[in-house]
Amino acid sequence: MDSLHASDLRLLAGAILVLVGIASSLLARRFGAPLLLVFLVIGMLLGEDGPGGIAFANYAFTYSLGSLALAIILFDGGLRTRLDKVRGAVAPSLLLATVGVVLTAGLTALAVHWLLGLGLLPSLLMGAIVASTDAAAVFFLLKAGGLHLGRRVGATLELESGSNDPVAVLMVVVITGTLVLGAGEAGTDALGIARTLGLQGVLGLAFGVAGGLGMGAAINRLTLPAGLHPLLTVAGAVALFAFTNLLGGSGLLAVYVAGIVMGNRPLRAQANVLAVQDAATWLAQLVMFLVLGLLVTPSRLLEVLWPALGVAAFLMFVARPVAVALCLAPFGYGKREIGFVAWVGLRGAVAIFLASIPMLVALPDAEIYFNVAFVVVIASLVVQGWTLGPAAHWLKVALPRSDPATRRIELDLPGQIEVEMVGYEVAEGCAILRGAPLPGWARPVMVVRGGGISTAIAIDALAPGDYAYFLAPPGNVYRLDWLFAPPDEAREAERAMFGAFTLPGDVPLGELGAFYDLPIPKRYAAHTADALFADRFDGHPQIGDRLDLGDATLVVRALVDERVQSVGLKFGSVGTRVFGHEAARAAPGPLARWRARREAARTRRGG
Protein backbone atom coordinates (compact mmCIF):
# COMPACT_ATOMS: atom_id res chain seq x y z
CA MET A 1 0.00 0.00 0.00
CA ASP A 2 2.87 2.36 0.75
CA SER A 3 4.14 2.00 -2.80
CA LEU A 4 0.67 2.80 -4.14
CA HIS A 5 0.49 5.90 -1.97
CA ALA A 6 3.97 6.92 -3.12
CA SER A 7 2.82 6.63 -6.72
CA ASP A 8 -0.24 8.75 -5.99
CA LEU A 9 1.94 11.35 -4.29
CA ARG A 10 4.20 11.56 -7.35
CA LEU A 11 1.19 11.98 -9.62
CA LEU A 12 -0.23 14.64 -7.34
CA ALA A 13 3.09 16.48 -7.25
CA GLY A 14 3.35 16.41 -11.06
CA ALA A 15 -0.18 17.70 -11.51
CA ILE A 16 0.41 20.47 -8.97
CA LEU A 17 3.57 21.52 -10.80
CA VAL A 18 1.66 21.84 -14.07
CA LEU A 19 -1.07 23.84 -12.34
CA VAL A 20 1.55 26.08 -10.73
CA GLY A 21 3.11 26.56 -14.17
CA ILE A 22 -0.26 27.60 -15.63
CA ALA A 23 -0.82 30.04 -12.78
CA SER A 24 2.70 31.42 -13.10
CA SER A 25 2.16 32.03 -16.83
CA LEU A 26 -0.76 34.29 -15.97
CA LEU A 27 1.31 36.15 -13.38
CA ALA A 28 4.25 36.45 -15.77
CA ARG A 29 2.03 38.01 -18.43
CA ARG A 30 0.52 40.39 -15.88
CA PHE A 31 3.90 41.66 -14.64
CA GLY A 32 5.84 41.30 -17.89
CA ALA A 33 8.31 38.74 -16.55
CA PRO A 34 9.93 36.24 -18.93
CA LEU A 35 7.99 33.04 -18.33
CA LEU A 36 11.10 30.88 -18.74
CA LEU A 37 12.71 32.71 -15.83
CA VAL A 38 9.63 32.02 -13.72
CA PHE A 39 9.87 28.29 -14.45
CA LEU A 40 13.57 28.35 -13.61
CA VAL A 41 12.96 30.08 -10.28
CA ILE A 42 10.20 27.59 -9.39
CA GLY A 43 12.67 24.77 -10.00
CA MET A 44 15.25 26.44 -7.76
CA LEU A 45 12.67 26.88 -4.99
CA LEU A 46 11.88 23.18 -5.19
CA GLY A 47 15.60 22.27 -5.05
CA GLU A 48 17.78 21.38 -2.09
CA ASP A 49 18.48 25.02 -1.15
CA GLY A 50 14.81 26.01 -1.44
CA PRO A 51 11.67 25.25 0.58
CA GLY A 52 11.10 22.10 -1.49
CA GLY A 53 14.35 20.52 -0.31
CA ILE A 54 14.55 18.10 -3.27
CA ALA A 55 18.10 16.84 -3.80
CA PHE A 56 18.49 16.19 -7.53
CA ALA A 57 21.78 15.56 -9.36
CA ASN A 58 20.91 13.21 -12.23
CA TYR A 59 22.74 14.81 -15.16
CA ALA A 60 22.12 11.86 -17.51
CA PHE A 61 18.35 12.17 -17.01
CA THR A 62 18.61 15.94 -17.48
CA TYR A 63 20.50 15.46 -20.75
CA SER A 64 17.86 13.04 -22.08
CA LEU A 65 14.97 15.24 -20.97
CA GLY A 66 16.62 18.33 -22.42
CA SER A 67 17.10 16.56 -25.76
CA LEU A 68 13.43 15.61 -25.88
CA ALA A 69 12.25 19.11 -24.97
CA LEU A 70 14.55 20.83 -27.48
CA ALA A 71 13.37 18.50 -30.24
CA ILE A 72 9.73 19.44 -29.58
CA ILE A 73 10.50 23.16 -29.31
CA LEU A 74 12.60 23.31 -32.47
CA PHE A 75 10.00 21.34 -34.41
CA ASP A 76 7.37 23.87 -33.34
CA GLY A 77 9.62 26.73 -34.46
CA GLY A 78 10.03 25.13 -37.86
CA LEU A 79 6.27 24.59 -38.26
CA ARG A 80 5.71 28.33 -37.89
CA THR A 81 8.51 29.45 -40.24
CA ARG A 82 7.19 30.56 -43.64
CA LEU A 83 9.71 30.19 -46.47
CA ASP A 84 8.20 33.04 -48.48
CA LYS A 85 9.10 35.36 -45.62
CA VAL A 86 12.67 34.14 -44.90
CA ARG A 87 14.24 33.62 -48.34
CA GLY A 88 16.26 36.84 -48.19
CA ALA A 89 17.64 35.99 -44.76
CA VAL A 90 18.96 32.46 -45.41
CA ALA A 91 22.58 33.35 -46.22
CA PRO A 92 23.15 35.87 -43.39
CA SER A 93 21.36 33.60 -40.90
CA LEU A 94 23.50 30.59 -41.78
CA LEU A 95 26.67 32.71 -41.56
CA LEU A 96 25.57 33.91 -38.14
CA ALA A 97 24.72 30.34 -37.09
CA THR A 98 28.19 29.06 -38.00
CA VAL A 99 30.90 31.72 -38.14
CA GLY A 100 28.97 33.86 -35.68
CA VAL A 101 28.89 31.08 -33.08
CA VAL A 102 32.63 30.47 -33.42
CA LEU A 103 33.37 34.21 -33.13
CA THR A 104 31.13 34.55 -30.09
CA ALA A 105 32.77 31.56 -28.40
CA GLY A 106 36.28 32.85 -29.11
CA LEU A 107 35.60 36.38 -27.86
CA THR A 108 33.80 35.11 -24.75
CA ALA A 109 36.75 32.80 -24.04
CA LEU A 110 38.96 35.88 -23.60
CA ALA A 111 36.67 37.22 -20.87
CA VAL A 112 36.45 33.79 -19.20
CA HIS A 113 40.25 33.43 -19.20
CA TRP A 114 40.68 36.85 -17.60
CA LEU A 115 37.78 36.73 -15.10
CA LEU A 116 37.92 33.06 -14.01
CA GLY A 117 41.58 32.28 -14.55
CA LEU A 118 40.91 29.13 -16.59
CA GLY A 119 43.30 27.87 -19.24
CA LEU A 120 42.82 28.78 -22.87
CA LEU A 121 41.14 25.53 -23.92
CA PRO A 122 38.84 25.35 -20.85
CA SER A 123 37.99 29.02 -21.46
CA LEU A 124 37.09 28.19 -25.06
CA LEU A 125 34.88 25.35 -23.78
CA MET A 126 33.05 27.81 -21.53
CA GLY A 127 32.67 30.20 -24.47
CA ALA A 128 31.25 27.41 -26.66
CA ILE A 129 28.73 26.42 -23.97
CA VAL A 130 27.15 29.88 -23.97
CA ALA A 131 27.83 30.81 -27.62
CA SER A 132 24.61 29.75 -29.35
CA THR A 133 21.34 31.63 -29.28
CA ASP A 134 18.69 29.51 -27.61
CA ALA A 135 15.86 28.73 -30.03
CA ALA A 136 13.52 27.81 -27.20
CA ALA A 137 13.97 31.19 -25.53
CA VAL A 138 13.77 33.17 -28.79
CA PHE A 139 10.67 31.43 -30.17
CA PHE A 140 8.91 31.44 -26.82
CA LEU A 141 9.60 35.04 -25.79
CA LEU A 142 8.91 36.56 -29.22
CA LYS A 143 5.59 34.74 -29.39
CA ALA A 144 4.69 35.49 -25.77
CA GLY A 145 5.57 39.17 -26.23
CA GLY A 146 3.25 39.48 -29.24
CA LEU A 147 5.94 41.31 -31.24
CA HIS A 148 5.42 41.81 -34.98
CA LEU A 149 8.93 42.23 -36.38
CA GLY A 150 9.97 43.34 -39.83
CA ARG A 151 10.31 40.43 -42.21
CA ARG A 152 14.12 40.36 -42.48
CA VAL A 153 14.80 40.80 -38.77
CA GLY A 154 12.23 38.21 -37.74
CA ALA A 155 13.44 35.72 -40.34
CA THR A 156 17.07 36.17 -39.31
CA LEU A 157 16.29 35.49 -35.66
CA GLU A 158 14.16 32.45 -36.47
CA LEU A 159 16.65 30.83 -38.83
CA GLU A 160 19.74 31.61 -36.77
CA SER A 161 18.36 30.39 -33.46
CA GLY A 162 16.94 27.27 -35.08
CA SER A 163 20.16 26.28 -36.89
CA ASN A 164 23.06 27.38 -34.67
CA ASP A 165 22.90 24.59 -32.08
CA PRO A 166 24.81 21.95 -34.13
CA VAL A 167 27.95 24.13 -34.26
CA ALA A 168 27.84 24.80 -30.52
CA VAL A 169 27.20 21.12 -29.72
CA LEU A 170 30.09 20.04 -31.94
CA MET A 171 32.47 22.56 -30.35
CA VAL A 172 31.52 21.45 -26.84
CA VAL A 173 31.86 17.73 -27.67
CA VAL A 174 35.21 18.16 -29.46
CA ILE A 175 36.75 20.39 -26.78
CA THR A 176 35.46 18.15 -23.99
CA GLY A 177 36.94 15.12 -25.75
CA THR A 178 40.25 16.94 -26.12
CA LEU A 179 40.38 17.80 -22.42
CA VAL A 180 39.50 14.23 -21.41
CA LEU A 181 41.58 12.22 -23.92
CA GLY A 182 44.16 14.66 -25.21
CA ALA A 183 44.34 16.33 -28.59
CA GLY A 184 45.83 13.36 -30.44
CA GLU A 185 43.20 10.85 -29.37
CA ALA A 186 40.21 13.16 -29.72
CA GLY A 187 40.76 13.74 -33.44
CA THR A 188 40.56 17.52 -33.20
CA ASP A 189 42.49 18.38 -36.35
CA ALA A 190 40.84 20.95 -38.59
CA LEU A 191 40.01 18.39 -41.27
CA GLY A 192 38.35 16.08 -38.76
CA ILE A 193 36.26 18.88 -37.29
CA ALA A 194 35.18 20.05 -40.75
CA ARG A 195 34.29 16.48 -41.74
CA THR A 196 32.21 15.94 -38.60
CA LEU A 197 30.42 19.25 -38.95
CA GLY A 198 29.72 18.63 -42.64
CA LEU A 199 28.37 15.14 -41.93
CA GLN A 200 26.09 16.41 -39.18
CA GLY A 201 24.78 19.22 -41.38
CA VAL A 202 24.23 17.11 -44.50
CA LEU A 203 22.54 14.25 -42.66
CA GLY A 204 20.46 16.62 -40.55
CA LEU A 205 19.27 18.49 -43.65
CA ALA A 206 18.60 15.31 -45.66
CA PHE A 207 16.74 13.47 -42.90
CA GLY A 208 14.85 16.65 -42.02
CA VAL A 209 13.53 17.08 -45.57
CA ALA A 210 12.71 13.38 -45.90
CA GLY A 211 11.09 13.25 -42.47
CA GLY A 212 9.00 16.36 -43.10
CA LEU A 213 7.75 15.05 -46.43
CA GLY A 214 7.02 11.63 -44.92
CA MET A 215 5.11 12.95 -41.91
CA GLY A 216 3.18 15.39 -44.10
CA ALA A 217 2.19 12.60 -46.49
CA ALA A 218 1.15 10.36 -43.59
CA ILE A 219 -1.09 13.05 -42.09
CA ASN A 220 -2.73 13.86 -45.41
CA ARG A 221 -3.25 10.29 -46.61
CA LEU A 222 -3.91 8.20 -43.50
CA THR A 223 -7.44 8.07 -42.16
CA LEU A 224 -6.88 8.35 -38.43
CA PRO A 225 -9.31 8.73 -35.52
CA ALA A 226 -9.98 12.31 -34.54
CA GLY A 227 -7.21 13.82 -32.45
CA LEU A 228 -4.39 11.48 -33.52
CA HIS A 229 -2.90 13.74 -36.21
CA PRO A 230 -1.17 16.02 -33.68
CA LEU A 231 0.18 13.02 -31.75
CA LEU A 232 1.54 11.59 -34.99
CA THR A 233 3.50 14.78 -35.66
CA VAL A 234 4.96 15.02 -32.14
CA ALA A 235 5.95 11.33 -32.03
CA GLY A 236 7.33 11.52 -35.56
CA ALA A 237 9.46 14.55 -34.70
CA VAL A 238 10.95 12.86 -31.62
CA ALA A 239 11.63 9.65 -33.61
CA LEU A 240 13.30 11.66 -36.38
CA PHE A 241 15.48 13.47 -33.83
CA ALA A 242 16.72 10.24 -32.22
CA PHE A 243 17.19 8.38 -35.53
CA THR A 244 19.25 11.21 -37.05
CA ASN A 245 21.48 11.40 -33.97
CA LEU A 246 22.07 7.64 -34.07
CA LEU A 247 23.31 7.88 -37.67
CA GLY A 248 25.73 10.71 -36.87
CA GLY A 249 23.63 13.62 -38.06
CA SER A 250 22.29 16.64 -36.22
CA GLY A 251 18.92 15.68 -34.76
CA LEU A 252 18.22 19.27 -33.74
CA LEU A 253 18.71 20.49 -37.31
CA ALA A 254 16.64 17.59 -38.67
CA VAL A 255 13.52 18.33 -36.59
CA TYR A 256 13.75 22.05 -37.35
CA VAL A 257 13.98 21.39 -41.11
CA ALA A 258 11.16 18.81 -40.88
CA GLY A 259 8.97 21.42 -39.21
CA ILE A 260 9.73 23.93 -41.99
CA VAL A 261 8.88 21.37 -44.68
CA MET A 262 5.58 20.44 -43.03
CA GLY A 263 4.63 24.01 -42.18
CA ASN A 264 4.98 25.13 -45.79
CA ARG A 265 2.80 22.41 -47.31
CA PRO A 266 -0.98 21.97 -47.21
CA LEU A 267 -1.63 19.93 -44.08
CA ARG A 268 -4.79 18.21 -42.90
CA ALA A 269 -5.92 19.14 -39.38
CA GLN A 270 -3.45 22.01 -39.37
CA ALA A 271 -5.33 23.95 -36.68
CA ASN A 272 -5.39 20.92 -34.36
CA VAL A 273 -1.73 20.16 -35.03
CA LEU A 274 -0.67 23.70 -34.15
CA ALA A 275 -2.92 23.84 -31.08
CA VAL A 276 -1.52 20.60 -29.65
CA GLN A 277 2.00 21.66 -30.61
CA ASP A 278 1.48 24.88 -28.63
CA ALA A 279 0.57 22.85 -25.55
CA ALA A 280 3.43 20.38 -26.07
CA THR A 281 5.94 23.20 -26.46
CA TRP A 282 4.68 24.94 -23.35
CA LEU A 283 4.89 21.70 -21.35
CA ALA A 284 8.38 20.98 -22.70
CA GLN A 285 9.51 24.44 -21.60
CA LEU A 286 7.96 23.99 -18.18
CA VAL A 287 9.46 20.57 -17.48
CA MET A 288 12.90 21.41 -18.90
CA PHE A 289 13.34 24.62 -16.92
CA LEU A 290 11.93 23.10 -13.75
CA VAL A 291 14.44 20.25 -13.93
CA LEU A 292 17.30 22.63 -14.71
CA GLY A 293 16.27 24.72 -11.71
CA LEU A 294 16.25 21.59 -9.55
CA LEU A 295 19.71 20.66 -10.76
CA VAL A 296 21.43 23.83 -9.62
CA THR A 297 22.47 24.56 -6.05
CA PRO A 298 21.97 28.33 -5.52
CA SER A 299 24.42 28.53 -2.62
CA ARG A 300 27.23 27.35 -4.90
CA LEU A 301 26.38 29.98 -7.49
CA LEU A 302 27.63 32.62 -5.07
CA GLU A 303 31.16 31.28 -5.42
CA VAL A 304 31.29 32.33 -9.09
CA LEU A 305 28.57 34.99 -9.12
CA TRP A 306 30.59 38.12 -9.87
CA PRO A 307 32.95 36.62 -12.45
CA ALA A 308 29.97 34.91 -14.10
CA LEU A 309 28.07 38.20 -14.26
CA GLY A 310 31.14 39.73 -15.87
CA VAL A 311 31.12 36.96 -18.49
CA ALA A 312 27.39 37.56 -19.08
CA ALA A 313 27.92 41.30 -19.50
CA PHE A 314 30.82 40.78 -21.91
CA LEU A 315 28.74 38.29 -23.90
CA MET A 316 25.71 40.61 -24.13
CA PHE A 317 27.49 43.90 -24.78
CA VAL A 318 30.70 42.91 -26.63
CA ALA A 319 30.99 39.35 -27.97
CA ARG A 320 27.50 38.92 -29.41
CA PRO A 321 27.24 42.45 -30.94
CA VAL A 322 30.69 42.17 -32.57
CA ALA A 323 29.90 38.75 -34.05
CA VAL A 324 26.49 39.92 -35.32
CA ALA A 325 27.91 43.11 -36.84
CA LEU A 326 30.68 41.24 -38.67
CA CYS A 327 28.24 38.64 -40.04
CA LEU A 328 25.31 40.89 -41.00
CA ALA A 329 26.92 44.16 -42.12
CA PRO A 330 28.08 42.71 -45.49
CA PHE A 331 24.43 41.88 -46.30
CA GLY A 332 23.25 45.47 -45.96
CA TYR A 333 21.60 45.25 -42.54
CA GLY A 334 21.05 48.62 -40.90
CA LYS A 335 22.45 49.63 -37.52
CA ARG A 336 19.07 49.26 -35.82
CA GLU A 337 18.54 45.80 -37.28
CA ILE A 338 22.03 44.69 -36.24
CA GLY A 339 21.48 46.15 -32.78
CA PHE A 340 18.24 44.27 -32.23
CA VAL A 341 19.54 40.95 -33.58
CA ALA A 342 22.52 41.34 -31.26
CA TRP A 343 20.27 42.07 -28.29
CA VAL A 344 18.07 39.03 -28.92
CA GLY A 345 21.06 36.73 -28.42
CA LEU A 346 19.14 35.05 -25.62
CA ARG A 347 20.80 32.28 -23.67
CA GLY A 348 18.52 29.61 -22.28
CA ALA A 349 18.23 25.89 -21.72
CA VAL A 350 20.74 24.99 -24.44
CA ALA A 351 23.60 26.57 -22.46
CA ILE A 352 22.71 24.67 -19.28
CA PHE A 353 22.06 21.58 -21.37
CA LEU A 354 25.56 21.79 -22.91
CA ALA A 355 27.10 22.52 -19.50
CA SER A 356 25.86 19.14 -18.32
CA ILE A 357 28.18 17.38 -20.81
CA PRO A 358 31.37 18.16 -18.82
CA MET A 359 29.49 17.02 -15.70
CA LEU A 360 28.59 13.71 -17.35
CA VAL A 361 32.25 12.92 -18.16
CA ALA A 362 33.49 14.24 -14.78
CA LEU A 363 35.71 16.88 -16.37
CA PRO A 364 37.87 18.91 -13.95
CA ASP A 365 36.15 22.19 -13.03
CA ALA A 366 32.91 20.82 -14.51
CA GLU A 367 30.85 22.42 -11.74
CA ILE A 368 32.33 25.80 -12.61
CA TYR A 369 31.13 25.45 -16.21
CA PHE A 370 27.65 24.52 -15.05
CA ASN A 371 27.30 27.30 -12.46
CA VAL A 372 28.69 29.98 -14.77
CA ALA A 373 26.35 28.89 -17.56
CA PHE A 374 23.43 29.02 -15.14
CA VAL A 375 24.25 32.59 -14.06
CA VAL A 376 24.67 33.65 -17.69
CA VAL A 377 21.26 32.22 -18.56
CA ILE A 378 19.54 33.96 -15.64
CA ALA A 379 21.23 37.26 -16.50
CA SER A 380 20.21 36.91 -20.15
CA LEU A 381 16.58 36.14 -19.33
CA VAL A 382 16.35 38.99 -16.82
CA VAL A 383 18.16 41.69 -18.80
CA GLN A 384 17.47 40.75 -22.41
CA GLY A 385 14.24 38.81 -21.96
CA TRP A 386 12.60 41.54 -19.88
CA THR A 387 13.59 44.30 -22.33
CA LEU A 388 12.79 42.50 -25.58
CA GLY A 389 9.65 44.53 -26.34
CA PRO A 390 11.03 47.94 -25.35
CA ALA A 391 14.22 47.28 -27.35
CA ALA A 392 12.22 46.38 -30.46
CA HIS A 393 10.20 49.59 -30.26
CA TRP A 394 13.19 51.77 -29.31
CA LEU A 395 15.20 50.46 -32.25
CA LYS A 396 12.09 50.74 -34.47
CA VAL A 397 12.21 47.17 -35.76
CA ALA A 398 8.75 46.23 -34.42
CA LEU A 399 5.85 46.79 -36.75
CA PRO A 400 3.32 49.20 -35.21
CA ARG A 401 0.57 46.60 -35.14
CA SER A 402 -1.61 45.15 -32.41
CA ASP A 403 -3.72 42.03 -32.63
CA PRO A 404 -7.48 42.47 -32.33
CA ALA A 405 -9.33 40.99 -29.40
CA THR A 406 -11.31 38.68 -31.67
CA ARG A 407 -12.18 35.14 -30.68
CA ARG A 408 -11.83 33.04 -33.79
CA ILE A 409 -13.32 29.55 -34.14
CA GLU A 410 -11.24 27.23 -36.36
CA LEU A 411 -12.62 23.98 -37.75
CA ASP A 412 -10.70 21.37 -39.74
CA LEU A 413 -12.45 19.84 -42.73
CA PRO A 414 -11.78 16.08 -43.12
CA GLY A 415 -10.08 15.31 -46.39
CA GLN A 416 -9.58 19.00 -47.20
CA ILE A 417 -6.18 20.68 -46.87
CA GLU A 418 -6.48 23.71 -49.14
CA VAL A 419 -8.98 25.61 -46.99
CA GLU A 420 -10.28 25.59 -43.45
CA MET A 421 -13.49 26.84 -41.90
CA VAL A 422 -13.38 29.76 -39.50
CA GLY A 423 -16.21 31.34 -37.57
CA TYR A 424 -16.77 34.63 -35.76
CA GLU A 425 -19.40 36.06 -33.53
CA VAL A 426 -20.69 39.24 -35.15
CA ALA A 427 -20.16 41.92 -32.51
CA GLU A 428 -22.09 45.14 -32.23
CA GLY A 429 -20.38 47.89 -34.23
CA CYS A 430 -17.73 45.66 -35.82
CA ALA A 431 -16.23 46.63 -39.16
CA ILE A 432 -18.18 44.06 -41.20
CA LEU A 433 -21.43 45.70 -40.05
CA ARG A 434 -20.09 49.11 -41.05
CA GLY A 435 -19.63 48.06 -44.67
CA ALA A 436 -16.00 46.90 -44.62
CA PRO A 437 -15.43 44.59 -47.61
CA LEU A 438 -14.88 40.87 -47.25
CA PRO A 439 -11.64 39.66 -48.94
CA GLY A 440 -12.23 37.85 -52.22
CA TRP A 441 -10.54 34.65 -51.00
CA ALA A 442 -13.01 34.28 -48.07
CA ARG A 443 -16.16 32.35 -49.04
CA PRO A 444 -19.25 32.62 -46.82
CA VAL A 445 -20.62 29.21 -45.83
CA MET A 446 -23.35 29.65 -43.26
CA VAL A 447 -24.74 31.85 -40.53
CA VAL A 448 -26.03 30.63 -37.18
CA ARG A 449 -28.83 32.86 -35.92
CA GLY A 450 -31.34 32.29 -33.18
CA GLY A 451 -30.57 28.60 -32.88
CA GLY A 452 -31.05 28.01 -36.61
CA ILE A 453 -28.60 27.59 -39.48
CA SER A 454 -28.92 29.46 -42.77
CA THR A 455 -26.77 29.18 -45.88
CA ALA A 456 -28.55 31.93 -47.78
CA ILE A 457 -27.95 35.03 -45.65
CA ALA A 458 -25.83 37.60 -47.47
CA ILE A 459 -22.88 39.23 -45.75
CA ASP A 460 -24.61 42.61 -45.83
CA ALA A 461 -27.54 41.06 -43.93
CA LEU A 462 -25.49 40.02 -40.89
CA ALA A 463 -26.71 41.18 -37.51
CA PRO A 464 -25.10 41.45 -34.06
CA GLY A 465 -25.13 38.11 -32.28
CA ASP A 466 -24.90 36.07 -35.48
CA TYR A 467 -22.13 33.51 -35.91
CA ALA A 468 -20.70 33.74 -39.43
CA TYR A 469 -18.58 30.94 -40.91
CA PHE A 470 -16.22 31.20 -43.88
CA LEU A 471 -13.91 29.02 -45.95
CA ALA A 472 -10.44 30.54 -46.22
CA PRO A 473 -6.85 29.47 -46.98
CA PRO A 474 -5.12 28.49 -43.69
CA GLY A 475 -2.46 31.17 -44.04
CA ASN A 476 -4.97 33.99 -44.50
CA VAL A 477 -7.58 33.37 -41.82
CA TYR A 478 -6.07 35.86 -39.38
CA ARG A 479 -6.73 38.65 -41.88
CA LEU A 480 -10.44 38.34 -41.17
CA ASP A 481 -9.98 39.15 -37.47
CA TRP A 482 -10.17 42.92 -37.85
CA LEU A 483 -13.55 42.69 -39.57
CA PHE A 484 -15.14 41.18 -36.46
CA ALA A 485 -13.17 42.87 -33.67
CA PRO A 486 -15.75 44.42 -31.30
CA PRO A 487 -15.01 48.09 -30.57
CA ASP A 488 -16.19 49.37 -27.19
CA GLU A 489 -18.02 52.24 -28.79
CA ALA A 490 -18.22 51.80 -32.54
CA ARG A 491 -18.21 55.40 -33.80
CA GLU A 492 -15.78 56.80 -31.25
CA ALA A 493 -13.49 53.78 -31.68
CA GLU A 494 -13.49 54.26 -35.45
CA ARG A 495 -12.70 57.96 -35.13
CA ALA A 496 -9.98 57.26 -32.55
CA MET A 497 -8.47 54.57 -34.74
CA PHE A 498 -8.65 56.16 -38.20
CA GLY A 499 -8.93 59.89 -37.52
CA ALA A 500 -11.41 62.41 -38.89
CA PHE A 501 -10.18 62.53 -42.51
CA THR A 502 -10.19 59.82 -45.18
CA LEU A 503 -7.84 59.89 -48.18
CA PRO A 504 -7.43 57.51 -51.14
CA GLY A 505 -4.56 55.06 -51.02
CA ASP A 506 -2.94 56.58 -54.13
CA VAL A 507 -2.55 60.02 -52.56
CA PRO A 508 1.01 61.30 -53.35
CA LEU A 509 2.98 61.71 -50.12
CA GLY A 510 4.96 64.67 -51.43
CA GLU A 511 1.81 66.71 -52.08
CA LEU A 512 0.28 65.50 -48.83
CA GLY A 513 3.37 66.63 -46.92
CA ALA A 514 3.48 70.00 -48.65
CA PHE A 515 -0.19 70.66 -47.94
CA TYR A 516 -0.12 69.68 -44.25
CA ASP A 517 3.53 70.61 -43.59
CA LEU A 518 4.49 67.00 -42.77
CA PRO A 519 8.12 65.79 -42.65
CA ILE A 520 8.11 63.44 -45.66
CA PRO A 521 11.64 62.12 -46.42
CA LYS A 522 12.78 62.94 -49.95
CA ARG A 523 13.08 59.26 -50.88
CA TYR A 524 9.35 58.81 -50.13
CA ALA A 525 8.08 62.06 -51.68
CA ALA A 526 7.26 60.38 -54.99
CA HIS A 527 5.56 57.42 -53.28
CA THR A 528 1.86 57.03 -52.67
CA ALA A 529 0.44 56.05 -49.28
CA ASP A 530 -0.24 52.58 -50.68
CA ALA A 531 3.41 52.18 -51.76
CA LEU A 532 4.73 53.39 -48.40
CA PHE A 533 2.58 50.93 -46.44
CA ALA A 534 3.59 48.11 -48.79
CA ASP A 535 7.27 48.96 -48.22
CA ARG A 536 6.99 49.37 -44.44
CA PHE A 537 4.88 46.26 -43.85
CA ASP A 538 6.65 43.90 -46.27
CA GLY A 539 3.81 43.93 -48.80
CA HIS A 540 1.24 42.67 -46.27
CA PRO A 541 -0.45 45.68 -44.63
CA GLN A 542 -3.54 45.14 -42.50
CA ILE A 543 -6.45 47.33 -41.53
CA GLY A 544 -5.31 49.38 -38.54
CA ASP A 545 -1.62 49.49 -39.48
CA ARG A 546 -0.24 52.98 -38.94
CA LEU A 547 2.73 55.16 -39.81
CA ASP A 548 3.77 58.35 -38.01
CA LEU A 549 4.60 61.46 -40.05
CA GLY A 550 5.57 64.12 -37.54
CA ASP A 551 2.49 64.93 -35.46
CA ALA A 552 0.26 63.18 -38.01
CA THR A 553 -0.49 59.48 -38.45
CA LEU A 554 -1.62 57.55 -41.51
CA VAL A 555 -3.84 54.56 -40.73
CA VAL A 556 -4.99 51.86 -43.15
CA ARG A 557 -8.81 52.00 -43.44
CA ALA A 558 -9.58 49.67 -46.34
CA LEU A 559 -7.75 47.05 -48.41
CA VAL A 560 -8.38 45.47 -51.79
CA ASP A 561 -6.20 42.44 -52.57
CA GLU A 562 -3.63 43.57 -49.97
CA ARG A 563 -3.38 47.02 -51.59
CA VAL A 564 -4.28 50.02 -49.47
CA GLN A 565 -7.48 51.48 -50.91
CA SER A 566 -7.97 54.27 -48.37
CA VAL A 567 -6.17 55.69 -45.34
CA GLY A 568 -7.24 57.70 -42.35
CA LEU A 569 -5.35 60.84 -41.34
CA LYS A 570 -4.99 61.65 -37.63
CA PHE A 571 -3.35 64.66 -36.01
CA GLY A 572 -1.93 65.17 -32.57
CA SER A 573 -3.36 68.70 -32.42
CA VAL A 574 -6.87 68.29 -33.79
CA GLY A 575 -8.01 71.91 -33.40
CA THR A 576 -5.13 73.39 -35.36
CA ARG A 577 -5.38 70.86 -38.14
CA VAL A 578 -9.14 71.15 -38.52
CA PHE A 579 -8.61 74.88 -39.13
CA GLY A 580 -6.01 74.01 -41.76
CA HIS A 581 -8.42 71.59 -43.41
CA GLU A 582 -11.13 74.23 -43.57
CA ALA A 583 -8.66 76.70 -45.04
CA ALA A 584 -7.79 74.19 -47.74
CA ARG A 585 -11.35 74.21 -48.99
CA ALA A 586 -11.33 77.99 -49.21
CA ALA A 587 -7.93 78.28 -50.91
CA PRO A 588 -7.04 75.16 -52.92
CA GLY A 589 -3.54 73.85 -52.28
CA PRO A 590 -1.49 71.02 -53.77
CA LEU A 591 -3.74 68.28 -52.40
CA ALA A 592 -6.88 69.98 -53.66
CA ARG A 593 -5.27 70.53 -57.04
CA TRP A 594 -4.25 66.87 -57.18
CA ARG A 595 -7.86 65.87 -56.44
CA ALA A 596 -9.08 68.20 -59.20
CA ARG A 597 -6.59 66.73 -61.70
CA ARG A 598 -7.67 63.20 -60.78
CA GLU A 599 -11.37 64.06 -61.25
CA ALA A 600 -10.60 65.74 -64.57
CA ALA A 601 -8.70 62.66 -65.75
CA ARG A 602 -11.60 60.42 -64.77
CA THR A 603 -14.00 62.68 -66.65
CA ARG A 604 -11.83 62.52 -69.79
CA ARG A 605 -11.64 58.72 -69.57
CA GLY A 606 -15.40 58.55 -69.13
CA GLY A 607 -15.91 60.80 -72.15
Image: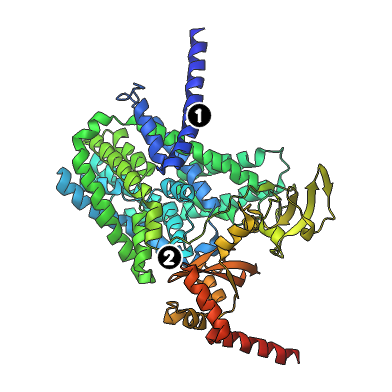
Q: Which residue is mark 1?
A: 19
Q: Is residue 467 left or right of 102 when viewed as pictured?
A: right
Q: Residue at the spot x=35%, y=47% of the render?
A: 347
**Disc 2 and disc 1 in contact, CB within 8 angstroms:** no
Using the numbered discs, state the Cα–Cα distance from disc 2 to disc 1 in whole angstroms. 42 Å
Secondary-structure class at tag 1: helix
Q: Is residue 424 left or right of 243 when viewed as pictured?
A: right
Which kind of residue does numbered mark 2 sit on? Ala
Taking depth in this image into account, of 433 and 207 the one nearest to the observer is 433
Secondary-structure class at tag 2: helix
Residue 558 in picture, x, y percent from top left = 63, 67
Residue 92 in picture, x, y percent from top left = 40, 64
Q: Which residue is mark 2?
A: 91
Residue 232 in picture, x, y percent from top left = 62, 41
Q: Is residue 408 left or right of 85 when viewed as pictured?
A: right
Point out the tag, 2 or 1, that comes first from the N-terminus: 1
Taking depth in this image into account, of 536 and 259 the one nearest to the observer is 536
Taking depth in this image into account, of 576 and 128 the one nearest to the observer is 576
Considering the image in quadrants, where does the C terminus appear? bottom right
